[in-house]
Amino acid sequence: MAIPRVPGRPPDENAFRRGLHHLRAYTAAHGHSSVPARHVTDDGFNLGTWVKTQRAKHKKGNLSEERTTALTSAGMVWDGVEVYFQTGLAHLRDYVVQTGHGRVHWLYVADDGFNLGEWVISRRVDRRKGTLSPVRIAELTSAGMVWDGRAKVRPA
């Protein structure tokens, strides 16, 4: 759905409104706002790039309070580490739905290019090192994470 340009508004405002619309639609469709960096909408809008730009502006203090509030209410996650974790978690959930188990092969790469296999290995290492919080462990376990990569596959 094309977002019409509003006469009298600067092009930047129209671009922001368009990006915000697409972010809300993405969040509604996927249940999260962790937009992959290369995500392009059906109408050709580079949503991944737009989200990254908004985060950079926010980090530098170049995003108005009004826009920050609008993005936050749309589900924007401002912390890149959090975004990466949530992206991996969403991919893990999708993988479990598709395969019936959470034992991800270390070479597995999702259709959008996200290297889920390496991400899962990194979370296992984080847990072994004691750097993964109990909240994160619970989230991953709930999503179907198989903590022992050598375990036999059992349907979820």
Image (cartoon, rainbow, N blue to C red):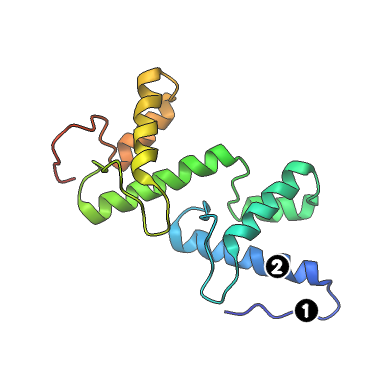
Indicate whether 139 appears above or below 64: above
Helix, strand or loop under label 1: loop
Query: Circle 2 is placed at which residue position?
Result: 17
Disc 2 marks a residue whose amino acid type is Arg
- Residue 154 pos. (x, y %): 13, 42
Q: Residue at x 74, y 79 (%)?
A: 5
At 62% across and 59% down in the image, what residue appears? Answer: 49
Looking at numbered disc 1 in the image, what kind of residue is underneath it? Val
User: Which percent across, then down, holds residue 41?
Assistant: 53, 70
- Identified at 75% across, 71% down, the residue is 14
Q: Is residue 52 left or right of residue 15?
A: left
Please state which of residues 37 and 127 is positioned toward the viewer in this rendering: 37
Asked if marks 2 and 1 touch (Cβ < 8 Å), the reply is yes
**Which residue corresponds to the image point at 27% horizontal and 30% vertical from the top-left?**
147
Q: Which SS class for mark 2?
A: helix
Q: Relative to residue 37, is residue 136 drawn left or right?
A: left
Residue with the most extreme right position: 8
Quarter that holds the C terminus: top left
Q: Position of residue 142 (x, y in %)?
A: 31, 38
What numbered label is drawn on residue 131? none
Instruction: Tell me the quadrant of the picture where the N terminus can be found.
Output: bottom right
- Label 1 crowding class (10 Å Cα cut-off): few <14, some 14-19, many 20+? few
Res. 111 image quadrant: bottom left
Q: Position of residue 15 (x, y in %)?
A: 72, 69
Q: Is residue 52 above or below residue 151?
A: below
* Mark 2–mark 1 distance (CA, rounded to whole Å): 10 Å
**Side of 10 relative to 29 (left or right):** right
User: From what the image shows, is residue 127 above or below residue 111?
Assistant: above
Q: Which residue is mark 1?
A: 6
